[in-house]
Amino acid sequence: MTAITWSRAESEEGLVPFDGRRHLRQVAELIGAVFADELDTSGRSALQEMEVVSRLSPLLGGLLSSTFFSEFVLGYVWVDNGSVVGNVTFQRTEMSGTRWRISNVAVAAEQRQHGIAKALMQATLREIAVRGGSWAVLQVRVDNSAARHLYQSLGFADVCQDGIWQRPPLPITLLPEPPADGAAEVSLRRLRGRDWQDRLELARAARSQLAYWAEPVDASNYQPGLGKLIGEALGNLTGFHQVARWGGWHNGQLLGAVEAVAANAGNQHQLRFDVRPGAPAGFAKVLIRQGLRFLASAPIRPIVAEHSGDDSEGVAALQACGFRPLRVLLTMRRLITPADV
């Protein structure tokens, strides 16, 4: 059994509540080392911000970090011989405080297999229970079997998978075989701003109930606000970035939609698509091809697609069109009970 020490002295050892004034720089370095190959653009940006704050003067940096983390983000660290070798972060995901997100579970490579991650997680679950939380939610890479086993042993259950898929920056060649007969019956047309409610309803229908519980579809991503309309119009006019959307309809219902974003001045293009359950076989491939046709005229860049890893047909269509998994995350959840206190 791992010993837990709650020393608040300068020589603190073992499990210690995170203190931004003392731990922020080492935590940033630990996260950067452990997740070096996993951080996306936003993750790297957040890490850089942590490092900047940690390098400010002791007074200013201490005030900023302690104010932010005490109000919005909590955590624990594991200290060994004065060095932070383990970390966990947790925060409310809603104002009611019933649901908490756990993240940045990291242990230095040379300190693993000693129960540090388990001790950090147990302390976190206890703190969430004390603060009246009902659910703990986290994400883990599907190929991280050791972490998944730990979370399962602590009572976490699978919710859904969300993947980032990437197509290499090669000239786009469309697949020669025709789509399935059922998919051929669905014709595509360009979607306009007025179709946003149908796109929103489709996005909600395409997610499972558990996936929707984990992350409800944000209506603001579909509503054609003035700022969004002006931004897309300027992007298309200047060629800085171009956005195009297509949808397939049947009996007045939107069966599927694809959005392609050509980032002519960026480093990667983007592709997103949704398919309604029960749509004709092969329709996901039709949507992806349409997006690729649009991107074929853009500068050669890697193409990144965000899609549910639980949609086996959608995943197969991505793979058939040259996409490979870049990162697939499994969302897990655990009910908090009085026994956790």
Image: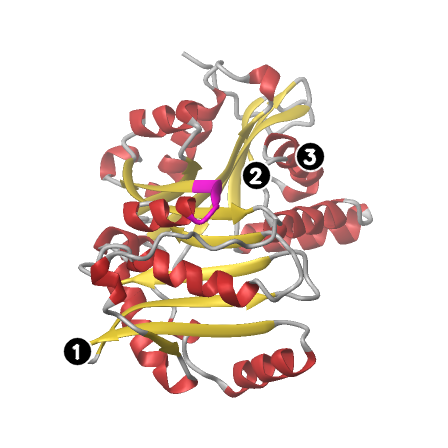
Q: In the image, is 214 to the left or to the right of 262? A: left
Indicate the position of residue 340 as horizontal and vertical percent values.
29, 34
Which numbered dot is residue 29? Answer: 3
Indicate the position of residue 86 as horizontal and vertical percent values.
56, 27
Instruction: Inspect the magenta stretch and tell me whether residue 58 lies in it.
Output: no
In the image, what residue type sits under mark 2? Glu
In primary-sequence order, the first of circles 3 and 1 is 3
Name which residue lies at 30% across and 24% down: 153
Nearer to me, 233 or 1 = 233
Name which residue lies at 34% across and 62% down: 274
In the image, what residue type sits under mark 3? Glu
Quarter of the rendering containing residue 287 = bottom left
Residue 312 in sight here: yes
Task: Tell me which segment is drawn in magenta.
Answer: 321-328
In primary-sequence order, the first of circles 1 and 2 is 2
Local SS, label 2? loop
Quarter of the rendering containing residue 30 = top right
Instruction: Tell me: residue 109, above or below residue 274.
Output: above
Residue 95 in sight here: no
**Mark 3 against mark 1, which lies toward the viewer?**
1
Residue that carries the numbered disc 1 in the rendered image: 251
Name which residue lies at 45% across and 14% down: 2
Which numbered dot is residue 38? Answer: 2
Indicate the position of residue 227 as horizontal and vertical percent values.
56, 84
**Magenta part, dominant SS:** strand
Local SS, label 1? loop
